[in-house]
Amino acid sequence: MSTIWLIDIDGTICDDIPNETPELFATAKPISGALQYVENLIKRGDRVVLFTARTADYASVTEEWLHQHDFPFEYVIYNKPRIKEGWTYHWVDNRSVRATCVPFGLLGSKHWEK
């Protein structure tokens, strides 16, 4: 059975760059091991969609960065609602949904499933 992964960009696969400093998007550093993790998801037949609070105004620089760093992805969903400290996302769906918080990036949780 294949899985569709919705993966955040900032703070999850690269440096956590806030929207207030978009000039840093192009120079963000990938989180160590994140590329290999995403590649392994694709190799096992899963789908990867990136989901970000970056606005669509920065689609060009965002996707250029992803291609420059060889991150495989199906597409990017922009304009994710920004979340403040102490807030949570609540996703309601008619299908099974699983969410994992990774406060230290894609590989920052010992409970992260491979």
Image (tube, grey):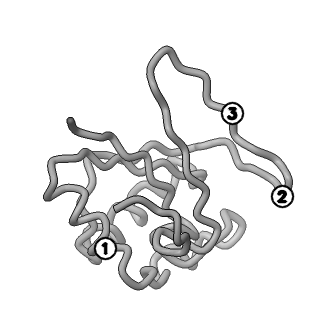
Dot placed on the residue nearer the N-terminal end, 1 or 3: 1
Mark 3 — residue?
90
Res. 104 image quadrant: bottom right
Q: Quadrant of the C terminus?
A: bottom left
Could you tell whether 105 is left or right of 18 in the image?
left
Label 2 residue SS: loop
Residue lying at the far top in this picture: please name it.
94
Q: Quadrant of the N terminus?
A: top left
Cα–Cα gap, marks 1 and 3: 27 Å
Whole-percent x and y of residue 96? 45, 26
Mark 2 — residue?
85
Q: Nearer the viewer, residue 40 or 35?
A: 40
Q: Nearer the viewer, residue 29 or 87?
A: 87
Label 1: how many Cα within 10 Å (few below 14, some 14–19, many 20+): some
Q: Residue at image x 69%, y 40%?
A: 89
Could you tell whether 43 is left or right of 79 in the image?
left
* Label total for image: 3
Could you tell whether 14 is left or right of 46 in the image?
right
Q: Residue at image x 61%, y 56%?
A: 101
* Residue type (three-letter) at the residue carrying disc 2: Glu
Cα–Cα gap, marks 2 and 1: 27 Å
**Contact, mark 2 vs mark 1 (Cβ under 8 Å):** no
* Residue type (three-letter) at the residue carrying disc 1: Leu
Question: What label does residue 35 carry, if any?
Answer: 1
Could you tell whether 96 is left or right of 44 in the image?
right
Residue lying at the far right in this picture: please name it.
86
Label 1 residue SS: helix
